[in-house]
């Protein structure tokens, strides 16, 4: 009974973490653009992004902890920190470990933003773009629900949303261009870019 509960909670927390990570990536891109979102003022997007990211950390830790306690999963502490050493599906399990390690790097440097400086913070934050697809592959090919229709649909929607956001991210119209109010008898000032805090 205990193992069944741990197994169910481990699966559920992993799925929630995946959804939260997807939302965090999308909000990170939106934050960088400097544009407001419907229902959210511009200044609050970065706050929501940070809070969603912290929530994903919580559910990711719950996902790993419950599977460590579950006898059926046979997850060992070395599997959490060292990739591709697992007894079952070592490659796909290893991708989860890689995603976790990347996520730790992004999270820790985010917390230490002021100490390490903006340049180092942004350099490490780019790892989020590598972490997300690795985590998704881990969920599809290593998760019990990976081949379920509802999970594949969820994954497809999340993937489409991130791809669209990334296309927007590299487009020429990504950053918001706002003109300052014109002075009497003078032309408007050149466009001014408003950049967020995340890459």
Image (cartoon, grey):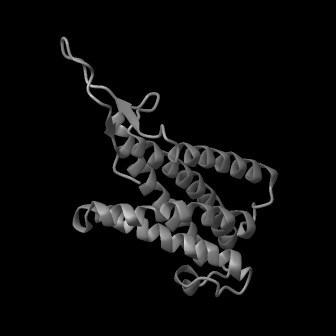
Q: As drawn, is 104 to the left or to the right of 9? A: left
x and y, in percent, of residue 2 in the image: 65, 71
Residue 96's image quarter?
bottom right
x and y, in percent, of residue 118 in the image: 28, 60
Q: What quarter of the picture does the C terminus occupy?
A: bottom left
* Any part of residue 157 in sight: yes
* Any part of residue 41 in sight: no
Towards the viewer: 2 or 47: 47
Residue 123's image quarter?
bottom left
x and y, in percent, of residue 29 in the image: 47, 47
Residue at x 40%, y 66% (from the top left corner): 124
Q: As drawn, is 7 to the left or to the right of 178? A: right
Residue at x 74%, y 82% (from the top left corner): 88
Say above or below: 34 vs 119.
above
Q: As drawn, is 31 to the left or to the right of 59? A: left
Q: What quarter of the picture does the N terminus occupy?
A: bottom right
Residue at x 19%, y 12% (from the top left corner): 185
Towards the viewer: 42 or 7: 42
Residue lying farthest to the left in this orientation: 184
Towards the viewer: 24 or 177: 177
């Amino acid at each position: 009974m205990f193992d069944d509960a741990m197994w169910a909670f481990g699966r559920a927390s992993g799925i929630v973490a995946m959804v939260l990570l997807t939302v965090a990536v999308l909000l990170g891109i939106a934050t960088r653009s400097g544009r407001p979102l419907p229902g959210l003022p511009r200044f609050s997007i970065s706050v929501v992004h940070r809070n969603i990211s912290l929530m994903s950390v919580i559910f990711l830790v719950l996902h790993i902890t419950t599977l460590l306690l579950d006898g059926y999963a046979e997850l060992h502490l070395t599997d959490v920190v060292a990739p591709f050493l697992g007894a079952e599906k070592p490659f796909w399990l290893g991708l989860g470990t890689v995603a976790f390690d990347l996520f730790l790097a992004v999270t820790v440097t985010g917390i230490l933003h002021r100490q390490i400086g903006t340049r180092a913070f942004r350099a490490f934050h780019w790892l989020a773009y590598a972490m997300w697809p690795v985590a998704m592959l881990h969920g599809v090919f290593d998760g019990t629900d990976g081949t379920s229709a509802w999970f594949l649909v969820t994954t497809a929607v999340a993937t489409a949303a991130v791809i669209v956001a990334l296309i927007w991210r590299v487009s020429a119209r990504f950053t918001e261009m706002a003109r300052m109010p014109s002075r009497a008898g003078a032309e408007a000032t050149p466009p001014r870019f408003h950049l967020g805090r995340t890459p």
